[in-house]
Image: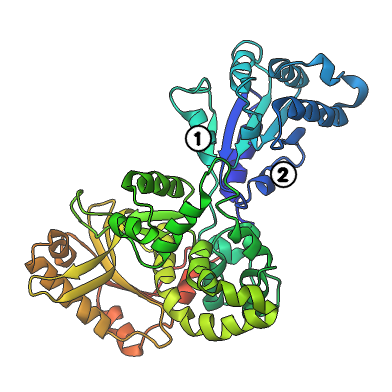
Amino acid sequence: MDREAELAELHRLADRREPVLALLCGRRRVGKTFLLDHAWRGRRHFYFLAADTTAELNRQELLRELGGMVGEAIDTDPGNYPSWRTVFRLLADLANEPLVVVLDEFQYLMAKDDDIVSHLVAVWDRELSGRPLMLVLCGSEVATMERLEAGDSPLYGRWTWAARLRPFDYFDAAAMVPERGPREAALVYGIFGGTPRFLATIRPGEQLAERVIESVLSPRGEVHLQLDRIIEQEKGIREPAEYRALLAAIAAGKTELEEIVQATGLGDRANAVRRIAVLEQLELIERDRNFGAHEKTAWQHRIADLTVRFWYRFVQPNRSRLETGGLVGARQVWARRVEPLLNDYMGKVFERICREAFVRHHEAWGLAGPASWARWEGKDRNRRSIELDLVARLDDGHVLTGEAKWSSQPIASDVHTNLLRDLEDLGASGQGWARDALSPTKSAGHVYFSAAGFTDAFRERAAAASNIRLVSLADLYPSRRDARREVSR
């Protein structure tokens, strides 16, 4: 599991030998508990996982578990610690030598009748000076945890470190299935996404089709069971059916707000906006619009989580057959409804992989980072339909354009010829960024990603040009040792 950056930062914080307050949040199953369980080896630490119960019962359980750590040397009888302030004082006393304390699922400790945050602030400000205590507050209710950073929170200005743990990108997801080749690693990412818990269900040597059938398609599969209740698992969400309806409508191609409202039957536009905002906060959906679009242009909403995207593309429409057919039915759905359409599904997934690859490898490729990145779809002034997979304004102001093709055949050089024609027509139609993309001084060149590689003729053309970059699927999955290897130019 690749969380080297977070692990290194936590190790540095734990070695500071001074009061450190850290915040970690993230959706369920992204690996928060795994990270915090493996970050403190060789260090004195105490980990407590709060339960969805009363603050009083959580406090009593914490003290009982703490007693198991300190033994009889210190009294941890819950009766002697009637408030969270007294508990934090005890933790401060225990920090006579470096101590890391992790309070996981911290949102369950934030009862209204016993304001744990105010108690923490009182002890932190007045009684912890110079003590080597690192206190990590962790939780899966992202909105609740992020409010602890807000300007009106009692803890504002006291955080030493704060982070939101997100699912893996395509590259780190592949590290969990190291025996898979590049194309299959991409398929794994398109189906299981970057959620470590889901990726961990894939066993070495197992056929991918069989794992998808048993874990995702089968109603008794581990991933299926998690995704079936993904909305209900988020505490505080009311009317989960409305959220599921929104996800289904967006997955079906209803991307603009008015289309979504009409498709879901929610009726109330404001109601839909509020619920969409919650889904965006959970990073289940995202929104974008054409590169260079006016700020008043309608947003296009899309499913952000790849596992959820696969669910609503292939599982949800086949629920009846899957529920009644057992594994036989799941295998039939795979053979008839999933496998024949998988390459079509992977088209947009591959665009996502290419974007993530550029963020990860652009320095090795000699290019500036992306300030903005989007597709472009529409018509030129002659009403000719044009679709570009990649338009980016880089940090140095240059414009990068290109295509991403999840194909079974090598890409020929006509893709470059067509792109140049499209840019010329768009520039003539008033798209200033398209003119920049062709300008010798404003263009960052053109990059082409292909899952099946490139023809020899295209490679020769690219080698003779200074502004064409070809990136194969194998280039997107270099070994760790060769991660900075230059791709074909």
Of the 4 image quadrants, the one containing the N terminus is: bottom right
Figure quadrant of residue 254: bottom left
The reply, left or right, for residue 88 in relation to residue 72 is left
Q: Disc 1 versus disc 2: distance between alpha carbons? A: 22 Å
- Which of discs 1 and 2 lies nearer the camera? The answer is 1
* Residue at x-position 75% and y-position 42%: 41
* Residue at x-position 81% and y-position 28%: 66
Residue type at numbered disc 1:
Glu
Q: Secondary structure at mark 2?
A: helix
* Residue at x-position 74% and y-position 24%: 56
Of the 4 image quadrants, the one containing the C terminus is: bottom left
Circle 2 Cα neighbour tier, 10 Å, few/some/many (<14 / 14–19 / ≥20):
some
- Per the rendering, the mark at residue 37 is 2
Position of 56 relative to 183 (above/below): above
- Number of numbered discs overlaid on the protein picture: 2
Position of 463 relative to 160 (above/below): below
Figure quadrant of residue 97: top right
Residue 361, x across and y down, in percent = 43, 61
Tell me if residue 460 can be seen. yes
The reply, left or right, for residue 314 in relation to residue 124 is left
The reply, left or right, for residue 33 in relation to residue 238 is right
Which tag, 1 or 2, sits closer to the chain's start? 2
| Residue that mark 1 sits on | 146
Residue 475, x across and y down, in percent = 46, 72
Residue type at numbered disc 2:
Asp
Residue 99, x across and y down, in percent = 73, 28
Q: Nearer the viewer, residue 224 or 71?
A: 224
Q: How is the rendered protein coloured?
A: rainbow
* Residue at x-position 46% and y-position 52%: 242
Question: CB under 8 Å between callouts 1 and 2?
Answer: no
In this view, the residue farthest toward the top is 126
Tell me if residue 472 can be seen. no
